[in-house]
Image (cartoon, helix red, strand yellow):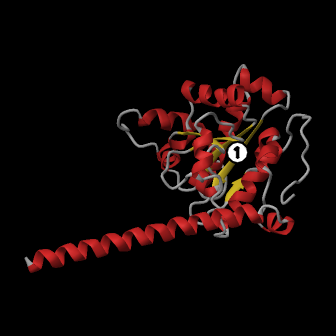
Amino acid sequence: MKNLLLLGCSFLLLTTQQACAQRKTNASTQDNRTTIEQNMTSPQWRKDNYIVNRDSAFANPYFALQKLRGGNTRFQQSRSIHPRQDPALIKRLSEGQSPFATIVGCSDSRVSSEILFDQGFGDLFVARTAGQVMAEASYGTIEYAYLMLGTKLVVVLGHTGCGAVAAAVKRPENPPGHIVTLINAIKPAALEAKKKQGETIDNAVRQNVINQVEELRQLESVLSRAYAEGDILIVGAVYNLATGKVEFLDETLTDLPKTSYSKRDITGL
């Protein structure tokens, strides 16, 4: 009987401690959200944290690109603000979404777009496959974001140490299952990379992104026309697994079509 009483008391004490800890965690989370909301009104804080207005990012793909750059800088500096994660917003998002960027990324578990760009619920429309290899379903997904959700920025996001790209470079005999489809899709980038100086797989990762950007820019009829008219921006980037940095590739940022969108820097405004 005594042992049962001691066991009951221990269980009650543990339950009470867990409840107190949970309350403290919830209070801390709420305090953090409140602090961020208050800081958003400070011009200096917005500048120091590379803040870009979300509505502006949704309306203008060049501002959206600035918003992604700012978020990744915070992430690199271990200063992520984890925006748009409160229950009230999540409930509102059940009624609809308006992501400001589409990310065409790799399925690799180490490349989570919302985390590395420090964005929140409803911010990014993400399509992921190994090596960012695209087919009809991927094309339709990207077009849906543009046509139905109004998303005007598309980022093809590769990453260092990509296994799919490495397989395309090494070209193993008799790859199992459908893995050969990945190798075939990435093979042109792998062959081009072997002609260049430097680390072949790193070069292939970059070339694969560049090829995929061009693939989307030329994709008839929705994306090719929207891109040519300057209504949508399609660019490429590579995420470094070791440093956390996203490098937007200059090869995809030059010679862009004329556009009516402003390109001024609004970071921190």
Quarter of the image for residue 255 reads: top right
- The residue nearer to you, when weighing 218 against 221, is 221
Left or right of 7: which side holds 207? right
Residue at 42% of width from left, 37% of height from top?
A: 179
- The residue nearer to you, when weighing 184 against 123, is 123
- The residue nearer to you, when weighing 82 against 221, is 82
Compared with residue 89, is residue 72 higher up or lower down, i.e. above or below? below
* Secondary structure beneath label 1: strand
* Numbered-mark total: 1
- Tell me where residue 143 appears, x and y as whole percent: 66, 27
Return the residue at label 1. 236
Left or right of 225: which side holds 205? left
Residue at 48% of width from left, 50% of height from top?
A: 163
Quarter of the image for residue 136 reads: top right
- Tell me where residue 157 appears, x and y as whole percent: 63, 46
Q: Is residue 194 visible?
A: no
**The residue positioned farthest toward the left in the image shown:** 1
Q: Is residue 72 visible?
A: yes
Residue at 72% of width from left, 22% of height from top?
A: 222
- Tell me where residue 257 appears, x and y as whole percent: 87, 34
Quarter of the picture containing the C terminus is: bottom right
**The residue positioned farthest toward the top in the image shown:** 221
Residue type, label 1: Gly
Residue at 40% of width from left, 32% of height from top?
A: 178
- Tell me where residue 170 appears, x and y as whole percent: 47, 47
Quarter of the picture containing the N terminus is: bottom left
- The residue nearer to you, when weighing 7 against 71, is 7
Q: Say few, some or many: other residues with alpha carbon within 10 Å of mark 1 (under 14 / 14 to 19 / 20 or more).
A: many
